Amino acid sequence: MKGYTGKYLRVNLGNGEIKSEILGEDVARSFLGGYGLVAHTLYNEVPDGADPLSPQNVLCLWTGPVAGTPVPVSSKYIMGARSPATGFIGFGISSGGIGSELKAAGWDGLILTGRSEKPAYVFIQNGQVEIRDASHLWGKTTWQTEELIREELCDDEIRVSSIGPAGELTTCLANITNDRNRQVGRSGMGAIMGSKNLKAIAIRGTGNVEVAHLDELMEYCRDLYQRCRGPATEKYRVLGTSANVLVHNRLGCLPVNNFQKGTFDQAEAVSGETMLATMVKKIVACPSCPIACDHINEVKDGPWKGTVASVDYESLELLGPNCGVADLNAITKAVELCDTLGIDTISAGATVSWAMEAYETGLLTKEDCDGLDLRFGNAEAMVEAVRRMCLREGNLGALIADGAARAAEKLGQDSYKFAMVNKKLEWGAYSLRSLQTATLGFATSVRGACYLRSGSYQVDIKGKVDRYHLDKTRGKVVSDGENLYAIIDSMIICKFTRGIYKTNDEIAKVIRLVTGWDMDAEEMIRTGERIHNMAKLFNLRFGASRKDDYPPPRAFEEKMYDEVSDGAIINRAEYDEALSGYYQARRWNEEGIPTKTFLEELGLDPGLGV
Amino acid sequence: MEAKKIIICDTEKCAGCEICEYVCSIFKEKTINWSKSRIRHIRIEPTFDIAIACRKCESPVCIKACPRDAVIGQEDGSINIDKDKCNGCGWCIEACKFGALKLDWDKRRVFACDFCTDLDQPKCVEFCPYDALEFTTLDQVGLESGKKAFKRVIEELE
């Protein structure tokens, strides 16, 4: 089997048993890799009712067939488990060199079970795998952990994925960092590592990566590299994703003050343009990436002088405008805290903004915030709140460490109405009421509020639909997006390369050249559909139903107020119809459950179907 | 004698993508294995990237360091490793101040960049997506730097 090593590791952290297992070609072709193998593993292995933070939960790391090859931006990996944040399927995809290194070490993936008695880390060096003591690393930041492991093992080329103190404290927002600036960010995968007493995974691989048609693949890559330097990726190369700040501000869909408004009067101060001119020290690339989108900021003056961190749109927006903050230095510092102490910047920003709204409406007092003046726009308070939530410090830290939904449960008094979540996961930086197709996509996402599952915001932003209203046809937009993105996330290639492929068959060609299979675009999209349904089945097993596919109350109950999207609101009847349209496009019933016949057609277990 | 061309890396343009390493192993070893690349990417966190290959030094210490005379200087300034003589002791690796030599762990011997002698330019240079790599002479690099500095002065005067 080409494109795969055909082997994965199974490590029981409880009894120390390490096994090599076979990845069959039938499973590989049916689920492709990455997201597909996460869904397949979790559906088959997580026991019914397993508490996410218990030793019964299964944590897996998978690569896809393109990892380790010269295909543009292919060195990616995914980690998945039942999410402590949502209770449903949890996973996050990261770049950097972990995926390629693991493939070169001879493994397609890694399944971790049980719980280590003492802090531990797993070290994989080609065929040698060991569980090592991590007592001396416990409490260290992710950046320190990377350096200490390389020092200890005397090899600077070791790639490390690790958690910070927040992961050790098993907060629902905890992420996993590798190669300093790349994260398995969403849905609390860092907490799963923490719950297993697993501080890090360190990998060194020096083997060959085999593909079916190397010469042809290289010729294709030559063409793809050129496309990566063309107009399809210009946005990412120049301003980076932060280019969205002014674009979204103009369209009235830039979340401001906890999603109350869609425009920011200080947008210029935090724009991608301003950031590039005043903050960006260098733009760097991940391995195998001809684009380079990673904008590394340096704080040049003020209390956070010397801070260096990678800042993208989502982090900037949610820790910035959505908290009313217009200070790029503060935003860069908050990102650094999140990356090193170990929480997701998106959830962090959307949770601090919730606390700020609770503070301004008087539900939270200054005393509740341990003296912090947590009003919108207070940059220093935002940074300090982030630090406290990472460390669960004080009253405020304890209240918000597990995200907005859980904080609202503790605070009560209708504060859940402005917790901007779906399935208890915080919303990304796209306004709900002025991007309504996006909202349908976010709310139906299997891992909770997420812009990365279908890219459904694109039809809104490009003006292809009436973004202030919903109708039945939007369901197909979301489900088509999900099927394609399931493939992108299973191969795994970077979504920023999606524009360089002119047709789906051009993506299938990559799979053909790497694996040698005769997979055409139709089979590929069908595979994406199978993968998405597998993930949905996992959620059904853990009690998902129609009520989980709705946006937060703010979407239906309050009108936006700003000069562009003034008065925008989601009509509940329209949303209901669009949601039913989505289920129909997916061939699910009105409760969002697939039929048995359909599951059999996809080659999936019909057990949970109707 | 013809001026020596070497692989120069513009550290401002190099983004650290390591595509040079992939490409090198694919064309030289007919497999994907960046640990067998003749050019080496180095990142010093957080923001410094460079790719380094053999510098064709005027007085190559790697040749002097080899106790078995396995490192042989070539006419173009590059080095060739005698497969039969090299036993992988690694003194040449230790001696090279640029980290341009590497040990092949399978064959247990040293290897170095041959600048894709049979081609117009090395494959890594051809494929570098950031145009950070250039196959040129040190004289030319100096001249280009001078031109750039002079242009800046002119622009400021204008």
Image (spheres, coloured by chain):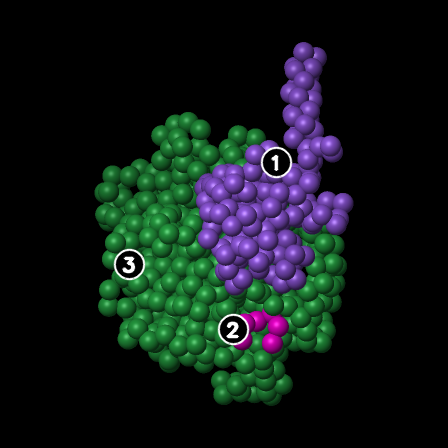
Chain colours: A green, B purple
In this rendering, is residue A287 above or below A576? above
Q: Amino acid at mark 1?
A: Asp
Whole-percent x, y for residue A342 in the image: 37, 52
Whole-percent x, y for residue A498 in the image: 66, 57
Residues at marks 2 and 1 on the same chain: no
Kindly identify which numbered label has been placed on residue A134. 3
Q: Label 3: chain?
A: A
- What SS does tag 1 mark? loop
Q: Label 2 belongs to which residue?
A: A37
Q: Amino acid at mark 3?
A: Ala
Q: Label 1 belongs to which residue?
A: B10
As drawn, the residue found furthest toward the front would be B68
Residue displayed at 62% across by 72% down: A2
Q: Amino acid at mark 2?
A: Leu
Between A344 and A101, the one lying in front of the other is A101
Residue A237 is left or right of residue A85, and the answer is right
Earlier residue among tags 3 and 2: 2
Q: Say whether residue A2 is magenta.
A: yes
Give the label, 3 or 2, closer to the camera: 3
Residue displayed at 61% across by 38% down: B56
Between A138 and A9, the one lying in front of the other is A9
- What SS does tag 2 mark? helix
Residue displayed at 54% across by 48% down: B69
- What SS does tag 3 mark? loop
C-alpha span from label 3 to label 2: 28 Å
Residue A117, picture quadrant: bottom left
Magenta span of residues = A1-6
Point out the image quarter for the N terminus of chain A: bottom right
Residues at marks 3 and 2 on the same chain: yes
